[in-house]
Image (tube, grey):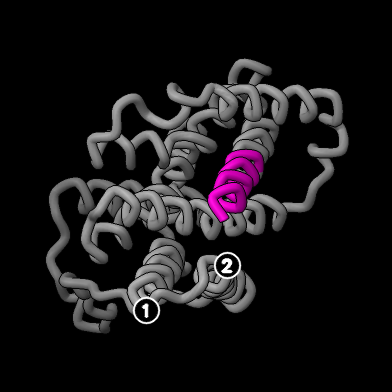
Amino acid sequence: MSGIVVWLDMVGVIVFALSGVVLACRSRMDPFGMLVLAAVTGIGGGTLRDLVLGVRPVFWVADPTYLWVIFATVGVSLVGFHYIHRLSRGFLPIADAFGLALFTVIGAHKALLLGTSGVVAVLMGMMTGVAGGMIRDVLAQRVPMVLREEIYATAAMAGGTVYVLLDALQAPLILTIAASLSVTLGLRIAAIHWHLALPVFAWVSVAPKTDDDATVPLSTSQKAKERVRMIRRERNRR
């Protein structure tokens, strides 16, 4: 079963690294930029998780295989650059959704192995799945997906909660992993397809414009602009 977790971790790194490569291509970055985005997306969330949990050294330092997987992903992407460049706009969110689901499971699993509480394990799963994509989007000067209206971090929290609950019930590991993956991926794909979002609460409301606004006295600069417009209208009439 531990082998399944390791393979899922590697698949998650590949998928997230590929999403970084795709975004780098669309942002017109050079090969080094592609490598940077692939790396921060693939191992950024797990690095932050290990630092918070006090794991030393972090996972990719203890096992450099993760770095070689990222290098290989970028190398293959450079060879097939023209195929990647033709991918539809919907590929990046879908690939990101798969990476989110995989890393949520890995983060929650590792946190529980280290003896953390269920709440901390859920947060570590969310952090593992979300943090790398946030760094990637910031470096590419995009609004991170987690800050947009569509459900993102909530899907990771739901999947992590399912994992923790099934683990507490001592369900088989393969069932726990499958259920957590299904919940996270299902919520995220549904949010992409149907544009599902959490409600937005605004503290400041803007009153609609009414006819009474016309009676508001103009400022000095507004009066000057209005005077210039009147002079131009007079000249046009002549």
Is residue 32 depicted above or below 178 in this figure? above
CB under 8 Å between discs 2 and 1? no
Is residue 85 depicted above or below 3 in this figure? above
Q: Which residue is labeled 1 in the image?
A: 169
Q: Is residue 226 visible?
A: yes
Q: Looking at the rendering, which quadrant does residue 118 occupy?
A: bottom left
Amino acid type at mark 2: Ile
Q: Nearer the viewer, residue 60 or 115?
A: 115
Residue 212 in the image, given as x and y percentages of width and height: 19, 82
Taking the image as shown, residue 210 lies to the left or right of residue 23, namely: left
Q: Secondary structure at mark 2?
A: helix
Residue at 71% x, 53% y is 91
Q: Which residue is labeled 2 in the image?
A: 174
Taking the image as shown, residue 232 lies to the left or right of residue 173, namely: left
Q: Looking at the rendering, which quadrant does residue 53 occupy?
A: top left
Amino acid type at mark 1: Leu
Residue at 72% x, 25% y is 72
Is residue 159 depicted above or below 90 in this figure? below
Magenta span of residues: 1-14
Residue 150 in the image, given as x and y percentages of width and height: 47, 68
Q: Earlier in the sequence, mark 2 or mark 1?
A: 1
